[in-house]
Amino acid sequence: MARAGGVDQVMLVRETAGALSALGFDPAGLVTSCRRLLGRHPMAGALWTLAARCLMAADPMAEAWRFADELADDPTPRELAAVIPDEATVMVIGWPDVVPSALARRGDVRVLVVDAFGEGSGLVRQLDSRDVDAQDIPLTGIGAAATAADMVLLEAAIAGPEGAVCPSGSLAAAATAAHAGTPVWATVPVGRALPPSMWEFATRSLRGPEPWENDEDIVPVGLIDAMIGPIGLRAGDELMARCDGPVAPELLRGLRDI
C-alpha cells in the first residue's frame, strides 16, 4: 500500500485497514507502517485520521475497520446534492473523489470541469454517461470558468484550521471567484479535517520556497464561503473548528524527517 497511487481515499483507507490487520497485534510495526504510508500519501486526510485513530485506540484493528465503514457510509455526497441550487452551473477542478457522486444525483446542473492533470476529460465522459451536462475546460480557462459559474465547488484532500488542500489551480479559481462574487464551496468528507498540529505536519511540504511546483494548493479559509460535510452545509469559517480525529504524538515525531 505504501507504493500504491491513483486511488481515492475511501479505497485507500479500506485497503490500508486490510493491510494493517495482517500485522496482528504489533504496536511497533503499526507505528512504522503508518509512518511509511503517510510518507507515501501525505495529502490523504482520511489516511492521517485512520493512522491517528488506530495509534490511539485500545483495539487498533477494530478501529481501522470501524473508520473504513464510516467512510463508506459518508453522507457528504447526499448532503451536497441536496443543497446545490437548481439548474446551477458548477465549476470543479480535476476529478474529485466525492463531488461527482453528488453531481450525478442532480440531473439539472451544468458542470464545468477544469482539466487539471489530464483528468478532466475522463470525468466529463463519466458525467455524460450519467446524463449530466458536463464541459471540459482547459487549464488556461480557469479564471473565465470561475467567473462564469454560479459556484466553484472544491473538494478538500485535507482540511484544517487554515483552509483546505485542493488540486493545483484551486487557489486561483477561489481568488477569481471571490473577486467576481462567485460563491466558493469546499466539500470536506468524513475523516479529512485534521487537528492543528496534524494539519501543520501534513501540509508542511506545501509551504516551501517554490509553491508553484506543488500539485496541490492551500485555499485559505477566508476564500471559502461554505463548507459541506457529513452534517450538511455550514459557514466556511466553521472549518477552523472542525476536527475528525485525535492527535497521535508518536506519529508526528516519527514524520519529522520524512
Image: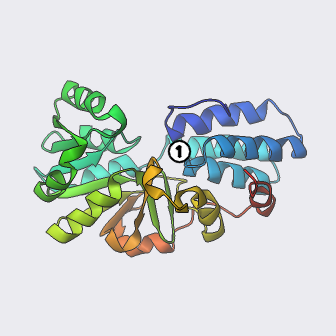
10 sits to left or right of 200: left
Q: Residue at x 18, y 43 (%)?
A: 111
Q: How many marks?
A: 1
Image quadrant in which you'd find residue 229? bottom left
Q: Residue at x 18, y 47 (%)?
A: 141
73 sits to left or right of 58: left
Q: Is residue 126 visible?
A: yes
Q: Give the image location of residue 107, x and y in percent.
A: 16, 39
Q: Is residue 183 visible?
A: no
Q: Residue at x 66, y 49 (%)?
A: 50
Q: Which residue does the numbered mark 1 point to in the structure image?
A: 71
* Label 1 Cα crowd, 10 Å radius (few <14 / some 14-19 / many 20+): many
Label 1 sits on a secondary structure element that is helix
Q: Give the image location of residue 17, x and y in percent.
A: 68, 36
Which colour assignment does the render follow?
rainbow
Q: Amino acid at mark 1?
A: Leu
Q: Residue at x 17, y 34 (%)?
A: 132
